[in-house]
Image (cartoon, coloured by chain):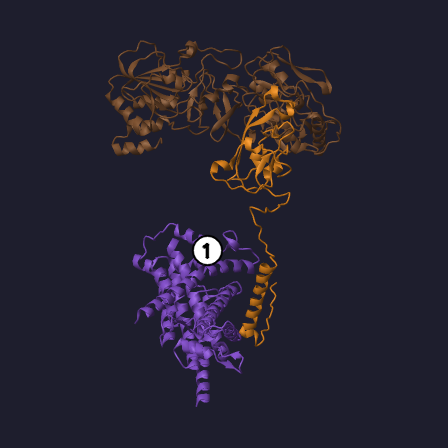
Chain colours: A purple, B brown, C orange
Amino acid sequence: MSLFDILAILGKVAFVLAVVLGSVPLIVWFERRGSAWIQGRVGPNRVGPFGLFQPFVDVVKFATKENFVPRDSSKVYYHLAPALAVVAPLAAFAVIPFGSQIIVMGQAIQLQITQLDIGILAILAFAGLEIYPVMLAGWSSNNKYGVFGALRGSSQMMSYEIAFGLSLASMLLVYGTFDLNEMVRYQQNTFFGFLPKWGILLNPLSFLIFLIAIFVETNRLPFDLPEGDSELVAGYHIEYGATKFMMFFFAEYVAMIMASSVLVTLFLGGYATLPGVGLLIHTLGISLDLTSDNQQNLLALGQVTSFIFKVALIMIFYVWVRWTLPRFRFDQLMNLGWKILFPLSLINLMFVASFLAWIGG
Amino acid sequence: MSETAPKPTITLDGKCIPFEPGDTIMRAAERANLDSDIPRFCYHPGLPVAGTCRMCTVEIEKSPKLMTSCSTPATDGMIVHTQSPKVRQSRAGVMEFLLINHPLDCPVCDQAGECSLQNYNYEYGPGTSEFKEQKRIFEKAETKKLSERLTLNMNRCVHCERCVRFTESVTKTNELLMNHRGWKKELTTALEEGVFNEYQGNIADICPVGAITFNDFRFKKRVWFLKPKETICDGCSKGCSVFADEEKNIVHRYRARENKAVNGHWICDAGRVSFHRRQEPQRVVEPLLRPTGSTGLVASNWLTVLPWFAKAIAEAKKILFVLGTDTTIEEAKALQHDFPQATFRMLNGIDGINTSKDDAPVDQLLRRKDQTPNTRGLEELGFTALDGGETGYELAIYFKSGRAAARSKKLAAIEVAWGVWFSPEITDFTAVIPGLSHLEKRGSFTNCDGITQSFVPAVTPLGMASSVEKVLHALNAKSRSQSKEALHVPL
Amino acid sequence: MAKVVSRKESFWDRFYIPALLIGLSVTLKHFFRSLVLGKTKTIQYPEVKREYSQRFRGRHFISIDQNKIENCTSCYLCQTVCPAECITIVAEERDPAQNPYGVAKEKKPLSFDIDALRCCFCGMCEEACPKDAIKLSRDYELATLNRDEAMYDLNYLKREVKGRG
């Protein structure tokens, strides 16, 4: 591996980290002001323009709070949990492609930190890891509410992992590959010359199941039972304060970004530009008389932007859903998971497989 | 009257009650405790009957007119109705006339809450008035000092003349009289100097409205906050029965309590304000001890003072125990029992009085020369007065309850003051053990006439003051652990 | 009587998806109404203050007359009626030399203390007062930095309040 490769990878890591972590405050800001707008309030508007600096002051607040540790907690796991909570979803970003490629000094750089052939499995693995911080935090803090939250969290994540995996599997059949880059490339094709061949159009049922599943996996309303403020106070992270709580807080949003990125990659064309935008960029490149390298770079810029745009739309959708639907009861949650989504995704998988066998055979 | 002869009776509201010959209807009702049904302004059991207020009128069968129950003699077989419609109508009329000129200043008036006019108006008043004109106002007598102790507000007066009759027949000083007639009738003092008798507080007590108020209590407290506690006055050897009106452990006034054997209906002014001694700021309410070599007494606590006291008693060979003549009989007995080694003396010391032989009435009514309550009681227990010949004692303990005098000269090396003491009195004592005033303890006094009266606590002790029983109990505790336990009791 | 309402759910209702979409559209409508039209219910508190009704019961005051002498005659009726026992009055006689009112104001409060931390703002003191002396103003900003400031004494209560504040 040449020095150039190493630098390129480091640059990509830095870029992804900067964008992901940098967008968290923005999302938090939108979460609070968006909630307020939906509820006919104003929301935080005091710190900075439009209250945009509110999350930063919140960070200062968290950092300067008392950093307490419950006396009877299991200290190692207690401290491990918030770290794991941030690391697991962040690591999953390694395999997500956020653009095709850029060409620097004549060398092509793939806009994906690691190009794994089995990328989707890595994502599944990291998603599975997200159960651990919930369990560890809830159990190690030695608190009844914490344990209740952890139990609920682990059982709901386990249950929906199945629907999550099966709907993903059906998409794997559709795309015929584990490679996320390949999937995006597939989705850049069009039906009838104008309608993009996105996963959502290829398999809408799978999209719906996947969408519901990621709400559960990220413990977002209407499935925030592990935190369930009204009955569990704060659920699994009840005994966490100061920076440790802030890490859980961060982790929730990082996980949301990660889940939306996967959703976008699988169903919404990934970094594929919106219909027409590609043509626009192409004409722009020609009219500016750019070299073919720079034309590619311009296209990559458009792709990264559209990827971020799509993820942002999903994040807004998260907030939108949060203030529309009330929290599920636990039995309703389990009903939905096991009795509806699980059979539905199985049927979907079998239908897709049969259909592919029929047209392919 | 022979025992078999039946007593004459009257029927009062359907109840058959006996009476003594010569009784009025009111008197007969009082004997049967049924007088609360008969309202009255001018009638008072301790005063001559006037029959002027017309409030106590009752209906007597076969009598065409209503009769005043305070002045109509009862006759055998008389049938009396105190609540018939006719009677109530008459009372409503009387109330309406009285209220024509009575100012509506109950919120400011000290009598509110124990005001006859208020109470009777609730019960019998018409509730409305036809009077639309200006009320009568005595501009010069709105707030007029009748003396240093009494204030008059003539606007509130209902002209019952109880006060005038009190000075006529009880104190026989005749300072008060009524000027003019009708609605201009005004109470004035006969002389420039105003009221000068020593029983003025009773005038405020018997005034049915707030026209005459006692300055010591004026504006101090609203009466509905007060809880009356039955006790006796310790201001002199008479031992008058009083109500101590208390709120939140502070006594706000004494009122006379009827006791035919001792004081009748009255108490003197000196006694009326004697409760102030109990809550004077100068009263010592925490244990004090003089550390070795120190010139002054230092505030201490029970856990320090009591072991020191026990040690001082054990080490002293000759102990002199001086009981003030305000010590209760029970305390004197207990101390005598617990200090068999000590020589006991009693000390009065006020105005040169030593024994009950020096005691004499000051006037024809109640007041006595001896200003301590129990000189006679201690004499009957066999105590002799301190005669100044006592020498050679190592430890002298002085016990008093705030009335008797402090000792005049030092009698022993170590001197302990026990009981109710005031800071000017204790300068050269070695230790002070705070005790209870008579309002805070139970016990009995024997008064100048040989009548022994018991009393119970009206209020709880101030500060760290503790009873004789508890201190003795702590001193007698044998082992250290017991002593500690006992010591916690007074705290 | 409980009334049984039978809900007829159509085939599509059973999917809940249409209902979900309706819900989402409602929240979206509110979102844009706040964002674009600025129709929010929030009051920007320190800059904008809510106007309360004349009957609002806030911080106490004692009304004063044209000579700045309190109307209170220290009758203790407010202390008597107060269910929270937060009023403590000590009365005294007004110095006759400085009393232009005669018997009407011969009694005055020596001290008049209100423990605002105990007060439940029921307004019964105001109702009991025969002189319209104690009143509850419309001042609702009662927060203090320490407990002592919440103990209102006579000097503070006598402050000038226009109308009901």
Residue C6, image x and y in percent?
Answer: 60, 70
Indicate the chain on which mark 1 is placed: A
Q: Is residue B41 visible?
A: no
Judging by the rendered image, the residue that carries numbered circle 1 is: A55
Q: Secondary structure at mark 1?
A: helix
**Which quadrant of the view contains residue B87?**
top right
B272 left or right of B165 in image: left
Q: Residues within 10 Å of mark 1 (few under 14, many from 20)?
A: some
- Closer-to-camera residue (A348/A232): A348
As drawn, A225 above or below C63: below
B276 left or right of B78 in image: left
- Closer-to-camera residue (B231/C5): C5
Picture residue at 34% right of the left edge, 32% below the top: B489
As drawn, C2 above or below B269: below
Q: Is residue C38 visible?
A: yes
Picture residue at 44% right of the left edge, 81% below the top: A174
Q: Label 1 amino acid?
A: Pro
- Closer-to-camera residue (C54/A282): A282
